[in-house]
Amino acid sequence: MASFESLGILFSIMLFGNLFLALFSKKKLHLIFNLLIFSAIIIFVLYLYINNATYSLLNLFSLNPFSEFFIFLFTLGAMLISLLYFGFSKKYNELSLFLSFSLLGMYAVSMSNSIPGIFIGLEMISIPTVFSILLSKKSLEAATKLFIMAAISIAIFSFAMAMSYGGVNTISIIESQYSLIMLIAFVLFLIGLGFEASIFPFNVLIPDVYEGSPSYVTALMGSMNKKAGFVALIQIVILMFTAFHSAFEIIAIVAVFTMFYGNIGALVQKNLKRIMAYSSISQAGYILIGVATATTYGISGSLFQIFAHMFIFIGIMAIIIVLELKNKKTIDDIVGLYKESPFLAVALSIFMLSLVGLPLTTGFVGKFLIFLSAISAGLAVLTFLGIINSIISLYYYLKILLSVYANGKRKVRILVNKTAVTVIVICLIVTILFGVYPQPFINFINSASSYLFTIAGKGL
């Protein structure tokens, strides 16, 4: 209980501190406060993990290896997003306040032992994000489309919650026995969370939302919001529906369609943000392969891919933000980028090759773990289709890189904002370091996935 009280105090300081500073402070003081409180949360969560601590609060929320992993991951992501807000928006104070609400929602989803807890957390993520987009007057359409998606998601999730209560007579996330009502509940949960996690066919508006939003908010949506949807999906599927073999067959089918939809959609795009939107959708398909295995190793692979993609996506969006300031938004606009900024060209190359699955990057480790777990679970077909999709994705990633290194007209050097340099370098370090030596993070991830299966009664 003491640990919950301590963490609750940190969360309260984060929220009310951002509220106060949004009203009375300058950007720099506000940024320093956020970096300090985020650092304190990270240190405290690592302390809990190292000491193998698990705590429960009224059986509604729990601190355990799974929730500790995602609190750690989302807080790291929030630090990078906060830096992007500071470097590229004049409304940093308002954006930081909305970010603190969204982050609290992510914490709630990660720690929740009950379906209403996840419901509240998802609401706290979506609504502040809509307001963050609305701070830009040019992004009304994107905000409206995101609001529509969030409203549909929450409505269907509410119906699923009611159905599951009728099947298990509790609001807790517990293992259920096979029944028609619970199978319907599973389908509704998959649809509701499909909007949150960008799963086919509930992701048709995602490219429009990503393109129409300010790029620093797009970085938040693609790196963290979508991952919170996966956190909810993984918890509900593994803890409630482990006895439903048909449920995991459905997830496998959805994974295949999601991969193909994302990669084929990206082939015909020229706008960089739309390409990244479709690429993000395809990554959701890879993550679903790990979930479809219904094994500890599969979930570990999915969690590593979530971690890898978060930093890759933030790094790429930081580059796109810099390019947009020079009115470079399409593949044609970045011809000869290596002459204008060798740093941006090299960074973009590493991130793109990591998304393909180049060895010695986190993208390779994530895909390797997912594909290996699928083979071990007897789902070699999924691995084959995943490899086919990786080959398809190679086309549009290389199309970007060929444009970057093509010879064009004489170019003017691009000066990169110090904040962008900091974010890009951090993301590069994570992408390469944990690609070369992933074991420390794999240990963290294995603890998280093993805990899930232990409480689900699946064992190891």
Image: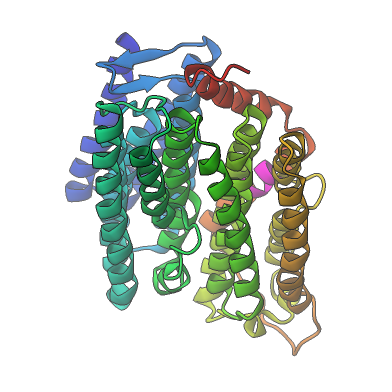
Which colour assignment does the render follow? rainbow
Q: In this image, 233 relative to 448: left or right? A: left
Q: Looking at the magenta stretch, what is its main secondary structure?
A: helix
Image quadrant containing the C terminus: top right
On screen, residue 38 above or below 360: above
Q: Can see residue 411? A: yes
Image quadrant containing the N terminus: top left
Q: Can see residue 93? A: no
Nearest the viewer among 308 and 302 is: 302
Nearest the viewer among 266 and 327 is: 266
Q: Write the residue at 40% across / 69% down.
A: 209
| Extreme-front residue of the structure | 180
On screen, residue 61 above or below 320: above
Q: Write the residue at 29% across / 18% down.
A: 59
From the top left corner, tell me how far across and down residue 425 is, in percent.
Answer: 64, 50
Q: Write the residue at 70% across / 83% down.
A: 411
Magenta part of the chain = 426-431
Q: In this image, 400 relative to 202: left or right? A: right
On screen, residue 142 above or below 113: below
Q: Write the residue at 60% across / 24% down.
A: 444
Query: So how many labels did they put on this image?
Result: 0
From the top left corner, tell me how far across and down residue 185 is, in percent.
Answer: 35, 43
Q: In this image, 151 relative to 103: left or right? A: left
Q: In this image, 203 relative to 371: left or right? A: left
From the top left corner, tell me how far across and down residue 341 is, in percent.
Answer: 69, 70
Q: Is residue 271 magenta?
A: no
Q: Is residue 430 magenta?
A: yes
| Image quadrant where residue 265 sits | bottom right
From the top left corner, tell me how far across and down residue 111 is, in percent.
Answer: 37, 28
On screen, residue 459 above or below 264: above
